[in-house]
Image (spheres, rainbow, N blue to C red):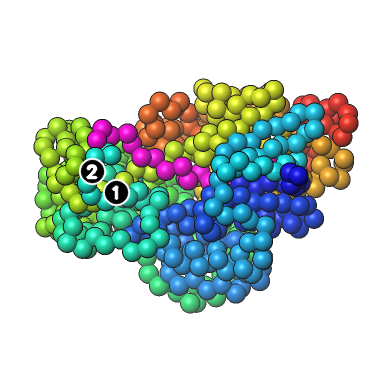
């Protein structure tokens, strides 16, 4: 007999765990499926050297339990992967979450039965369960991207991906290591790998802007002050466009209203402060190219000051606008290229042609290696969803529905896919925010929706095409008022060959959260609600 639940949640990362806790509070039956061997999502898989969060630890934490907020003590300004995983394990144990999770179980297909208003979830092992609702907590950065390079299978050495790092020790001492990619995981891992490897070759196609993290032991007085007013701390952060950094708010003034000396002083202060706050030095950096150029020039001057070889410094200096790709935070990244055992390989001018048994061949020659590390990121936002065969009303595949790019209403619902919720999906602020805040907001909204459906005897909820079309237009209009879409970033899917280029996240958390609240207050306007055994009750 097939097991049946009220809710199936796909993914036991930080989103899936909080969603599980909320569904239990509502008194609903639930089963969570997780491909990994334990909870943690991003922090279970990304164990590469130097992995840590780029959101301050006091902000990158759950807010659904005051007791949890008070009892957990963070040790660093930016927590490491092991510390975050310990925190997640504490949450799982404290709230007894494991009993409803099936680990080492990957969902292969989700199929909607329209007459029954039920979803069937099938695992890769062929097991099936049925549920009224499916909540996709698959994460935005969980589908690892390994580029198709000729000869990969012939390499005689070891191959790793930062997003699927082994759980045991990886011995790099005395070895020649090649790292492909200089996004966030590359920027974090390269300085650590350089300290151990005999020789390190960094294969860079596009230089990234990376700012000093300024990491340090967490100040005990600061942690105590935040705990004394965690509610206010959360509220102030939620009022920020990025749902964070309220302690260092953006300057409301234009860069063109200050003198050159004042401008440099403002940039320098935020550079020394550490973290991602440089882009908030003035209010026009992400909307005016001329203003953006001033911030970018400041960072390029810093690179030239740090990196001793002027040719290497030039290669490490990005040419694109600053901030249109996700800003990286680092500890000693640029300094690493002053080490004699570190070599920068420019694959923009001399592309990788193939991987050989002995290493990597570019158009300029061969590089002999013992280890290759892919720091090549993820098929972001849509990748984790489209790797599952999701079929909605009439058997329509989500992959076909989104063939021209993702289309959602509020980043939460998709027309033709009733009772399916996409947490932090395309069309929501998501990756442009502190994800913990966006997750909390989506858990709260989905939980409220499920309660409303139960209280009103509604069997199905589905985003309307009209509301979705208007929302997609709104997301694009907001993006076009900024510089975010101006370069080839994973926000657009540009890192995945053949992927339709659409700017996927929505900038601006407070306005989004307000819109979601208004939709809920207006009986879920923009969704079709179908009462049990009846025709749709609402279609607006």
- Circle 2 crowding by C-alpha within 10 Å: few under 14, some 14–19, many from 20: some
Q: Position of residue 79 (x, y in %)?
A: 44, 64
Q: Position of residue 229 (x, y in %)?
A: 62, 69
Instruction: State left or right for residue 281 relative to residue 231.
Output: left
Instruction: State left or right for residue 214 relative to residue 224.
Output: left
Image quadrant containing the C terminus: top right
Say which residue label 2 marks: 155
Say which residue label 1 marks: 159
Taking the magenta stretch, the answer to whether it contains residue 149 is: yes
Residue closer to the observer: 442 or 151: 151
519 in relation to 258, above or below: above
Question: Would you identify the image quadrant in which residue 51 lies?
Answer: bottom left
Magenta-colored span: 134-151
- Circle 1 crowding by C-alpha within 10 Å: few under 14, some 14–19, many from 20: some
Determine whether label 2 and label 1 are within 8 Å by CB: yes
Question: Mark 2: which secondary structure?
Answer: loop
Q: Position of residue 98 (x, y in %)?
A: 63, 61
Query: Of helix, strand and loop, which mostly describes the magenta segment?
Result: loop
Report, in whole angstroms, how far the alpha carbon at label 2 lies from the one at label 1: 8 Å
Q: Residue at x 43, y 58 (%)?
A: 53
Q: Residue at x 46, y 67 (%)?
A: 83
Residue closer to the observer: 406 or 142: 142
């Amino acid at each position: 007999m097939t097991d049946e639940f009220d809710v199936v949640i796909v993914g036991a990362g930080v989103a899936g765990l909080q969603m599980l806790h909320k569904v239990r509070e509502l008194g609903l039956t639930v089963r969570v499926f997780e491909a990994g061997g334990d909870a943690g999502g991003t922090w279970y898989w990304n164990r590469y050297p130097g992995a840590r969060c780029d959101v301050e630890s006091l902000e990158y934490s759950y807010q659904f339990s005051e007791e949890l907020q008070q009892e957990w003590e963070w040790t660093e300004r930016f927590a490491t992967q092991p510390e975050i995983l310990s925190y997640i394990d504490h949450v799982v144990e404290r709230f007894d979450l494991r009993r409803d999770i099936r680990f080492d179980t990957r969902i292969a297909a989700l199929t909607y039965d329209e007459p029954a208003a039920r979803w069937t979830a099938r695992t890769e092992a062929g097991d099936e369960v049925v549920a009224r609702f499916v909540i996709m907590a698959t994460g935005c950065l969980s589908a690892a991207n390994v580029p198709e390079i000729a000869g990969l299978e012939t390499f005689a050495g070891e191959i790793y991906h930062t997003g699927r790092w082994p759980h045991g020790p990886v011995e790099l001492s005395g070895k020649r290591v090649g790292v492909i990619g200089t996004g966030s995981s590359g920027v974090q891992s390269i300085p650590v790998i350089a300290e151990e490897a005999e020789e390190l070759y960094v294969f860079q196609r596009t230089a990234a802007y990376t700012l000093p993290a300024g990491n340090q032991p967490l100040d005990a007085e600061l942690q105590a002050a935040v705990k004394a007013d965690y509610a206010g701390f959360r509220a102030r952060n939620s009022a920020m466009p990025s749902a964070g950094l309220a302690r260092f708010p953006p300057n409301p003034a234009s860069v063109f209203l200050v003198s050159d000396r004042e401008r440099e002083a403002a940039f320098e202060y935020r550079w020394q402060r550490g973290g991602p706050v440089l882009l908030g030095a003035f209010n026009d950096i992400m909307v005016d190219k001329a203003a953006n150029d001033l911030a970018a020039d400041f960072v390029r001057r810093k690179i030239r000051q740090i990196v001793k070889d002027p040719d290497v410094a030039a290669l490490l200096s990005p040419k694109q606008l600053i901030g249109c790709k996700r800003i990286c935070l680092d500890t000693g990244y640029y300094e690493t290229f002053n080490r004699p055992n570190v070599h920068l390989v420019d694959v923009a001018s001399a592309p990788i042609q193939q991987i050989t048994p002995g290493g990597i061949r570019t158009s300029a020659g061969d590089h002999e290696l013992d280890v290759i590390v892919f720091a090549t990121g993820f098929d972001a936002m849509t990748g984790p969803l489209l790797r599952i065969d999701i079929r909605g009303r009439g058997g329509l595949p989500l992959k076909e529905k989104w063939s021209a790019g993702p289309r959602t209403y509020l980043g939460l619902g998709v027309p033709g896919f009733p009772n399916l919720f996409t947490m932090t999906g395309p069309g929501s602020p998501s990756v442009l925010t502190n994800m913990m805040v966006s997750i909390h907001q989506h858990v709260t909204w989905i939980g409220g929706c499920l309660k409303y459906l139960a209280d009103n005897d509604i069997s199905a909820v589905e985003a309307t095409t009209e509301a979705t079309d208007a929302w997609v237009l709104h997301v694009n209009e907001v993006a076009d008022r900024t510089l975010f879409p101006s370069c080839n970033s994973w926000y657009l899917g540009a890192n995945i060959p053949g992927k339709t280029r659409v700017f996927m996240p929505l900038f601006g958390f407070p306005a989004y959260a307000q819109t979601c609240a208004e939709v809920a207050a207006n009986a879920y306007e923009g969704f079709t609600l179908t009462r049990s055994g009846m025709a749709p009750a609402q279609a607006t």
